[in-house]
Image (cartoon, grey):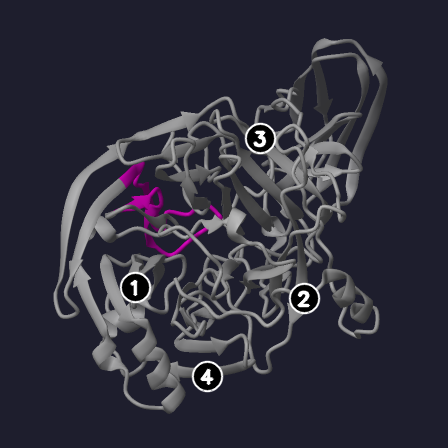
Amino acid sequence: MDTHATRAQGKSFHARRSRQRNWRIGIIALWMTAATSLWAQDPFNLYLEPLNIPEVSGLQSYAFGQDSNGRWLLVGGRIDGLHRRQPWASFDVSGNNTQLIVIDPVAKQKWSASLSSLPTSMQEQLSSTNMNFYQEGDYLYCIGGYGYSATQSDHTTFPYLTAIKVPDVINAIINNTSFTAYFRQITDTAFQVTGGRLRKIYDVYHLLGGQKFLGRYNPMGGPTFTQQYTNQIRRFQIQDNGATITVTHLPPFTDAARLHRRDYNAEPQILPNGEEGITMFSGVFQTTADVPFLDAVTVDSSGYAVDSGFQQYYNHYHCASIPLYSAMHNEMHTVFFGGIAQYYDSAGVLVQDNNVPFVKTIARVTRDSTGQMAEYKLPIEMPALLGAGAEFIPASGVPHYPNGVVKLDELTADTTLLGYIYGGIESSAPNIFWVNNGTQSSATSRIFKVYLIKDSLLTSTHQLNRHSRASLQMEIYPNPSDGYFTVRYHLQRPGQVSLYLRTVDGKILYHRTFSRQSAGPHIHTLRDLRLPRGTYFVTLTTPWETLTRKLIYKR
C-alpha cells in the first residue's frame, strides 16, 4: 500500500529529544534493539509519539484501506469495548460502526459518511466486526465478519466478499458526493468466516483460520449460537476487472489440531530462502484447553509447517504489529504491541494467567537465517492496557516488499516514520471478562506515530524469553464442585508455594503458604468452605510462576 511521506525523516533524534522535554503531551520512548546473539549491533530502535486528531472517536476490530496520499478509509468494527457478559447485550447493534470514516493523519482531519445509501447486505456486512481484509491496489477486499443481520433477525457471520475502490470512496466522502458505485459484492459460503486473517502469497490469497459463528454470543454457555472453526487455510485467486469479480478456489490446507485458530496475528514474512510467506502467531483456542496456542504456523506457496520448537508467550490475540526484514542479515522481525496474552512479565518473573488478561507487553519475534525463531520482550510497555483489536497502518514512502514487509536495510535516514497505531480496546484492568458489564473497557481513539531510529548509540537490550513451558501442571477436580475440591500440581524444583481462592472481584477467601515443598507431585483438598453458588478463581504462586484457574461452585 502507498502511504504518505513524513517531514520528520532525516531529522536528528537528539535534536528532537531536546524539544520533547518542553512538550505538554508526553512521548513514550520505546528503545528497541536486537540481542547480540542475532546481530553484531543493534538493528533499530523504535519510539511512539501520541498524535491528536480532533473529532476522531474510538474504534476497534475494524478493516482499513489507504489511498496514495496516505489517507485512511476505516470500515466496520465496533465503537464499544470488550463484548459484555450479559447475553442480551453482547455485540449489541448500538455498538456497530455504521459510518465510513476517512482520516488524514498528516493534515489531522477526519470525515465520515453513513452506510445507509448502500444495499442492505452491504450495510450489514460493512458494519460487522472482525472482517478479514486485504488491499490490492485501489481495491480493499472485505470478507465475512460477525454482526447483527436485520434480514435474518439474528446475529450471523456474513457469507460475502465486498470490493471497495478506496481512493474514489475517500474522495466522495471528503466531497460529500455519492460513493455507491464504488462498492461491489458477491456471495460465497467459503467466505463465511470471522476472526481469521486474509493475506496473500504472490498471486494466491490465503484466508487463514477463523470461524463461522451463527446466533447471539452467549458467554453464559446457553444454546443461543453455533460455532464452527474452519480448521483451514482457504486459498483462492481473485480476477477483478473493476466490474466483475471472479473467484477461483484452490485446494485448502486442513488441520483440525493446528489450524484451529482465530483472533490472532498472521503477518506477511520473507522466509530464509527469500520467498514470500505468512506466519500465524498464536491464536485461540487450543483443542484441549481454553488457552491460546503458544506455537506458530508458517505458510509458504506449497504448504505449511508448525514451528513446534518455538513458544510465543506474549501478544496472543490480534494486536497492532509490524513485519520488518533485513536482507543483509537474512533476519525477519515481527513486532507486537500490547493486546491480550496468557503470559506477562512481572519484575523478571514470567507469570502465567489462564484467564488470559489484557497486557501492556511489547515484544518481537525474530526468525534467523537458519529458520530458528526467538521471542524478545522489550524493556518498555504500552502506556495503558491497549493494543487488542488495534491496527498498524503504514506510512507513505516506507520501502516494502510486495507483501507489505518493511525493507529494513533501506531505511537509511536517522529517523523514519513507519506508520501509525490506531484504536483497539482499552481496558481498565487486566482481567475484566468475568465481571464485564460494558463499563470496564472502551474502544480507544488513541493514535500513536511509530518511528524507527537508526542510531547504534541509543541502545537497550531486549530480554530473550528463556522460559520453558509452564511446569505447574495445575488441575482442579471436581470442577464444577459441590462442596469440596482438590488442587493437584507438580513442582520441577523445590520451593515455596502459595495457594489462593478468590472471588471474581479479587477478594481473598482462602490463603495458605507452604514454605518449602519438594520437587514432584502435590495435592491439596479444600472442604466445607460454605461458598455461595458462583464462579471463583484458584491461584498457585511459586517464585518462578503464577497460574490461575477458574472454579465453578454449584452447592
Q: Which contiguous range is marked in magenta?
A: 205-233
**Crowd band around label 4 with a 10 angstrom C-alpha radius: few (<14), some (14–19), many (20+):** some
Is residue 206 one of those drawn in magenta? yes
Front: mark 4 or 3: 3
- Residue annotated with mark 2: 11
Specify the amino acid type for callout 3: Ala
Q: Determine which of the numbered discs, if any, sits on residue 374 in the image.
A: 3
Q: Is residue 205 left or right of residue 465?
A: left
Specify the amino acid type for callout 4: Trp
**Crowd band around label 3 with a 10 angstrom C-alpha radius: few (<14), some (14–19), many (20+):** some
Residues at marks 3 and 2, CA–CA distance in whole angstroms = 32 Å
Q: Secondary structure at mark 4?
A: strand
Q: Secondary structure at mark 3?
A: strand
Q: Quadrant of the N terminus?
A: bottom left
- Residue 62 or residue 432, whichever sits in front: 62
- Residue annotated with mark 4: 111
Tell which circle, 1 or 4, labels the residue nearer the N-terminal end.
4
Q: Determine which of the numbered discs, if any, sits on residue 137 in the image.
A: 1
Instruction: State whether residue 342 is above or below residue 177.
Output: above
Q: Quadrant of residue 116?
A: bottom left
Front: mark 3 or 2: 2
Front: mark 3 or 1: 1
Specify the amino acid type for callout 1: Gly
